[in-house]
Amino acid sequence: MSFLSEDFARDGYFVVRGLFEPDCLAAARRECEALVEETAVRLKADGKVSDISGGASFAERMALLYREIPEESPTTFRQELHREGFFGLFAHPRLLEMAEAHLGPELRLYPNYSVRPKLPGNRRTEVLWHQDAGYTEGGSQVLKMMNVWTPLVPARVENGCMQFVPGSHCQGLVPHEKETYYLKISDAVIGPVEGGAVNIEVDPGDVVVFSNLLFHRGLPNRSAQVRWSMDFRYQDATQPTLRLTQGHLLRSRLRPEGVVRDAAHWAQLRFQ
Ligand SMILES: O=C(O)CCC(=O)C(=O)O
């Protein structure tokens, strides 16, 4: 796993092209389509939309549904992810191998696994410069994590791909300020390094692995389509989550009976 330690140590991230097999990806995408269908039916029942846009493509339908009510659009799906089709990504053996090499044998899926439909032109989906560790409650304690981001449609500058500042994880935890929707790294810290940011343009199947101290943001979506992605984090399960929720064990030698067994088991569990 030398590529993990070399690139990760120097840049704070690395990209693995084509990690997810087509079947694995298709299963996750089908679950997203089912989530959108359920959302459409609910919006219709609540009288919020007259047209459920049933014929629209995956990349367009959420945007059409929330065209008249953009302030009501979900920015993430989280509670809803206990469905069989997502398990293959969360528990992909190659990701768990990398996580084990980085974090040790006790691995939990940290309780903020998300599907993100980044709607076009919606300020609530523009994620500002931050470190993920800046969102972890518990003051200056930095949890040991391996963070993963993966697109379900091609992610480009135009539709709001991620931007990273390579090497910024070496600065440790820096001050964040609360903005309207998200935290933002203080201008005095991000200003001098922002010019060195790189665009992380990736395709479905590709995986971006990054440090929870890396300075990063999600650009605004200036396209006409939804930028669908998933992000999740593995944590050393011997550490506290510093949240009320505990996530789920994916590998363990200490407590093998607590590990999520398979997709069917995952689907019986809840976000916790
Ligand atoms: O998907 C995005 O635009 C931002 C996601 C992000 O910042 C994260 O996963 O930490």
Image (cartoon, helix red, strand yellow):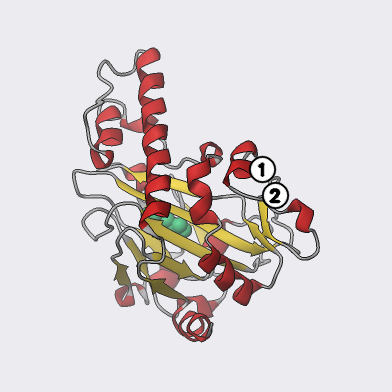
Q: CA distance from mark 1 to mark 2?
A: 6 Å
Residue carrying label 2: 246
Query: Considering the numbered disc 2 on the image, is that residue within a helix, a strand or a loop?
Result: loop
| Residue type at tag 2 | Gln
Residue carrying label 1: 272
Whether pointer 1 and pointer 2 mark residues with C-beta atoms closer than 8 Å, the reply is yes
Q: Residue at x 24, y 25 (%)?
A: 53
Mark 1: give few (<14), some (14-19) or many (20+) Cα within 10 Å.
few
Q: Position of residue 91 (x, y in %)?
A: 56, 57
Q: Is residue 153 visible?
A: yes
Q: Position of residue 158 (x, y in %)?
A: 21, 56
Pick out the residue farthest to the right: 254
User: Quarter of the picture for ligand 1?
Assistant: bottom left
- Residue situated in front as seen by the camera: 88 or 155: 88
Q: Earlier in the sequence, mark 1 or mark 2?
A: 2
- Residue situated in front as seen by the camera: 189 or 197: 197
Q: Residue at x 61, y 44 (%)?
A: 266
Report the quarter where the C terminus lies.
Answer: top right
Q: Is mark 1 within 8 Å of ligand 1?
A: no
Mark 2: give few (<14), some (14-19) or many (20+) Cα within 10 Å.
some
- Residue situated in front as seen by the camera: 108 or 116: 108
What label sits on residue 8 in the rendered view?
none
Q: Position of residue 124 (x, y in %)?
A: 37, 43
Query: Considering the numbered disc 1 on the image, is that residue within a helix, a strand or a loop?
Result: loop
User: Left of 136 or right of it: where is 54?
Assistant: left
Height in image: 198 above or below 75? Answer: below
User: Left of 1 or right of it: where is 201?
Assistant: left
Q: Is residue 184 visible?
A: no
Question: Quadrant of residue 79 in the image?
Answer: top right
Report the quarter where the N terminus lies.
Answer: bottom right
| Residue type at tag 1 | Gln
